[in-house]
Amino acid sequence: MRRRAPNDTKQSAHSGHSPIRPNDHALRELLRHGRQKKILELQGRIAWQGDLRAWRKSRGIQ
């Protein structure tokens, strides 16, 4: 069983969450990039209907 290092249990002063270990961060990034790739594969396959500018404005996106 792996013993936790003393700083593993400390909370980040500014976020209120435990710090993310590098291997956890790398795995999350790999998964995020995989999801992005799947979305990008849809490019050109979906016909857009609507006013993108109005949609962004309604969502608070400039």
Image (cartoon, grey):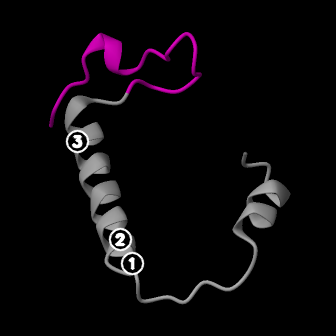
Q: Position of residue 53 (x, y in %)?
A: 74, 61
The residue type indicated by label 3 comes to Ala
**Looking at the rendering, in which quadrant would you find the N terminus?**
top left
Indicate which label's residue lies in the foreground, 3 or 2.
2
**Residue beneath label 3, please?**
26
**Residue beneath label 1, please?**
43
Residue 59, above or below 18: below
The residue type indicated by label 2 comes to Leu
Q: What element carries label 1?
A: loop
Query: In the orientation shown, which residue stands out farthest toward the right?
Result: 58
Q: Where is residue 9 in the image (x, y as percent from the top left)?
A: 40, 20
Label pair 1/3, CB-CB below 8 angstroms: no
Q: Which of 29 and 21 is in front in this view?
A: 29
Mark 2 Cα within 10 Å, few/some/many (few <14, many 20+)?
Answer: few
**Residue beneath label 2, please?**
40
Q: Residue at x 75, y 73 (%)?
A: 51
Marking on residue 10? none
Question: In which image quadrant can residue 58 be found?
Answer: bottom right
Query: In the orientation shown, which residue stands out farthest toward the left?
Result: 1
